[in-house]
Image: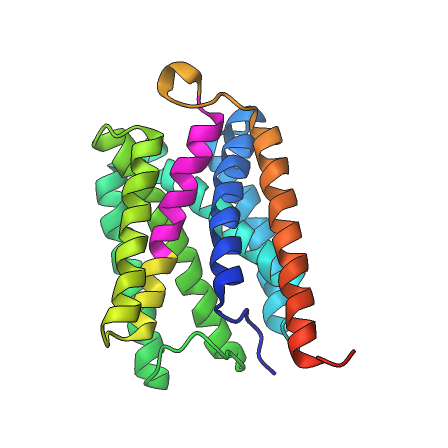
Amino acid sequence: MNKVAKVTIYFWIMKIIATTLGETAGDFISMTLGLGYYIAFAVTFAILAILLFFQIQGDRYRPALYWVAIVATTTAGTEVSDLMDRSFGLGYAVGSLILVACLLSVLAIWYYRDRDLSVYPIIRKDAETTYWLAVVFSNSLGTAFGDFLTSNLGLSYIQGALVTASVIGVVIALHYMTKLSDVLLFWLAFIFTRPFGATFGDFLTKPIKNGGLSLPREYASAIAFILLALVLFFSVQKEKKIRHPLE
C-alpha cells in the first residue's frame, strides 16, 4: 500500500506550516534551551531516525506519523543549516551548494534505479528510503537558502518570505501554463516552501529591532503545531468523505 501523503492543496498548506514549525522548534532546541548546534543536531537527527524507522517499516500511510516526520525533517534542516554556517564556518552560500549536490545525487540514484521520480504513490521500502533522503536534503537546502536571503543578501524576514512566495507563485504558474515535468515542479515547490516557512518563522520569533515580532519560540511553535493538527484533521475527514461518500 501507498506510504506517503497525496499531493493536494492540503499537502502544501501543511508543508508550509510544518516548515514554520521546524524553524521555530529548531531554534528553540538549539538557542532557547541552550543546547548548542552540535547537541541540537544530534538530538533532532536521533528523533528523526526513530520516526523514519517506524514510518518506513509501516504497512500503510499514517497521516499523523507522516507529518510528524516531515516536521522532524524541517527541524533537522534548521540544525544542519546553522551547523554548517555557525559551527563549520562554511557560510550559507557554500552550504546551499553542498546541499544542492547532495539532493541531486539522491535524485540521480533514485532515477537510475527506478527510471522515475514520481512521489505518489510510494510503496516499496527502498523507494521510500530514497524519498525521505530527498526530503531531508531538500528541507535542509531550503533552510540554508532562506538564511542566505536574510543573512547574506540583507533582506528582512518579510522580504525573504515574499521572495520565496514569488518563486512558489512562478512554479504554480508553470504548472498550469506549461508542460514542464510535474516531478520537477514538485521538487522546486517542495524546496522553496521551506525558506518561505523558515523566514516567516524567523519573522515571528526574532527581536523587534531585527525586524521580527519577538514572539517566544515555544509560543510560535505551539501555534504552528495547533494549526498543523487542525489542517491535518480536516484533510483526513475530507479524504474519508471522498472514499465513503454515503456514510
Residue 126 in the image: state x and y as whole percent: 48, 78
| Residue 193 within the magenta-colored segment of the rendering | yes
Outermost residue on the top side: it is: 209
How many callouts does the rendering have?
A: 0
Q: In this view, does 119 lie to the left or right of 150?
A: right
Q: Which residue is drawn at 49% across and 71% down?
A: 129
Q: Is residue 160 left or right of residue 247?
A: left
State which region is magenta. Answer: 191-206
Above or below: residue 129 compared with residue 75: below
Quadrant the C terminus occupies: bottom right
| Residue 121 within the magenta-colored segment of the rendering | no
Compare residues 125 and 5 and report the one nearer the observer: 5
Q: Which residue is drawn at 27% across and 42% down?
A: 163
Compare residues 188 and 108 and report the one nearer the observer: 188
Outermost residue on the front side: it is: 246
Residue 18 in the image: state x and y as whole percent: 52, 49
Q: Residue at x 64, y 77 (%)?
A: 242
Residue 189 in the image: state x and y as whole percent: 35, 59
Residue 157 shows in this picture: yes
Q: Quadrant of residue 236?
A: bottom right
Q: Give the image's coloring scheme.
A: rainbow
